[in-house]
Every structure is written in structure tokens, then in C-alpha cells.
Image (tube, rainbow, N blue to C red):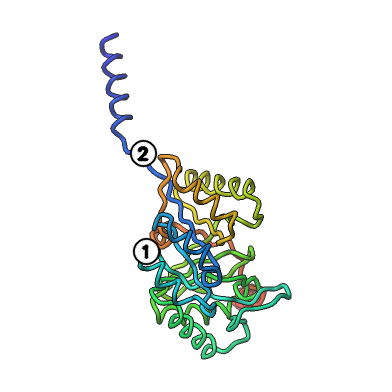
Amino acid sequence: MFPFRRNVLAFATLLALSSPVLAGKLAIVIDDFGYRPHNENQVLAMPSAISVAVLPDSPHAREMATKAHNSGHEVLIHLPMAPLSKQPLEKNTLRPEMSSDEIERIIRSAVNNVPYAVGINNHMGSKMTSNLFGMQKVMQALERYNLYFLDSVTIGNTQAMRAAQGTGVKVIKRKVFLDDSQNEADIRVQFNRAIDLARRNGSTIAIGHPHPSTVRVLQQMVYNLPPDITLVKASSLLNEPQVDTSTPPKTLCLMHRVIRSVA
């Protein structure tokens, strides 16, 4: 009896040791590239798994996109989109009322200004991304360029995933903003939160900016990740399960009610 128990225990221990440890995947995207080459070059000196998002009409857009690509970093277009709040806007900010042709023109210009881009994420955009019809025009344009969309989730009821339905555009979503506060202690808290989410859910995406405080925290923390956390490029998460937590626009809800009542 006792030898049998010992054999079972030994087998269970061996099985546990031989089973692979599933790593949590952490993608970090640094936005707002193109304005501060000094800080941005510090980001490019970090592991190439960190992705960067370049503002297409910034003065150093082409230079920094090319440098990032040559350093092995994934490049996204940080596309300005209209916010709900009143604030100064970047040139060529997408607005819901724009025509499909105007949106396509702006995206074409952005693609030309940011070489090597494989995806797009929104700069601001609470008004634009919460508008289903506006985002459908965006997704139709993105499909022509074979670009994915990283939803920065600047509003809870973003329609990005819903708008991509019926197109070939893949959508992934930001889970953590690293530096809403530029206090280093707060940034560390958010970085550790991203690690916890990656561990719990299998993967997560964190977005930050090339602020000096963010750069310092990243320089400390990306080289000291826990052994079960792997730093990955954002595009490596395109096939990870994504949940659409948005609600359809009121007009669609009303249409569905009318259809049900007629049926």
C-alpha cells in the first residue's frame, strides 16, 4: 500500500515538473511618437518587443517610424480621432460626419507618412470610436491596407469591434493605461496591474507615452519581468480571444425593436 502511494506521489511530482508553465503575454505600446526624438530613442533602445505608435502628421513621423522598424520594433499609426471633449486637435483628425472618401484620404496620407506600419490605434477618439457608422467607414478603409486596429478604449462604449464585423480587419483592445498619472510610483502600480492581468487572462495590452517618467519606469521594469510573463509585440495577440463589451447604438436598438414587432 505504502509503496503504491509513494509511486503515485512520485509520478504526480514528475508530471508537475515536466508540464510546461504557461506564460502570460504582455504587449506594451508607446504612443505619441514623432514629437520627442530624444525620449523616443530611449524607448527604441529597449527590447524590440515594445511596439510604437507614430502620429502621422508629427514633424518626425517618418524618421521615427523608420528608426523603430530598423530597430526591430513594430510600428503602428497613432491616428487622431475626434474626442467628446473640447481640446486642440491634430491635423487630419477623423470625425464621424466625414465622408468615406475623406476618411480614406486621411488614412492613405497616414500610411504614406508612417512607413512600415502594420496597424493603427486611435489618438483620443471618444467621439469617433463610439460612433458605429463613423467607425464602419474607418474599418472599410483599413481593410484596403491590410492593417489591424488596436482600440485604445478611450470610451467604454467603443464600437470598433462591432464596426469591424464583415471586414477582414482584426481588432484588439487596450486593457491598461500606464501613465494617466506621470508619477513614477503610479506608473509602477499600473505596470504591475498589467502583469497581473496578463497572468490572469493569458495576455494583456498596456499603452504608455514617451514621458521621461514613463521611460524611467520602463527602463527599470521591462528587464525584470517575472519568469512567467513574456513581452510580445501587439500583433502577436491578434488571434487571442477578444470580448466585445459595447452596446449597439440606440438607432440600431430601435430598428431591432421595430423588426421584432413587425415580425
- Please determine whether, in this image, residue 21 is positioned above or below residue 250: above
**Picture coordinates of residue 112 (x, y %)?**
43, 83
Closer-to-camera residue (135/198): 198
Measured along the vertical axis of the image, is residue 171 above or below residue 60?
above
Kind of residue sitting beneath label 2: Val
Q: Residue at the location (53% across, 65% down)?
A: 31
Count numbered badges in the picture.
2
Could you say which is closer to the camera, residue 210 or residue 26?
Answer: 210
Vertical order, 243 against 230 (above or below): below
For image coordinates 50% across by 75% down, the residue present is: 60
Quadrant (top left, top right, bottom left, bottom right) of the N terminus: top left
Disc 1 + disc 2, Cβ < 8 Å = no
Q: Secondary structure at mark 2?
A: loop
Q: Which residue is mark 2?
A: 21
Location of mark 1 (residue): 71
Residue at horizontal 49 percent and vertical 76 percent from the top: 61
Instruction: Check disc 1 and report its element: helix, strand or loop.
Output: loop
Q: Residues within 10 Å of mark 2 (few under 14, many from 20)?
A: few
**Compared with residue 230, is residue 261 higher up or lower down, i.e. above or below?**
below
Q: Is residue 165 left or right of residue 126?
A: left
> Which mark is first along the chain, 2 or 1?
2
| x and y percentages locating residue 8 in the rendered image | 29, 19
* Position of residue 215 in the picture relative to residue 202 (left or right): right
Q: Is residue 191 visible?
A: yes
Residue 161 visible in the picture: no
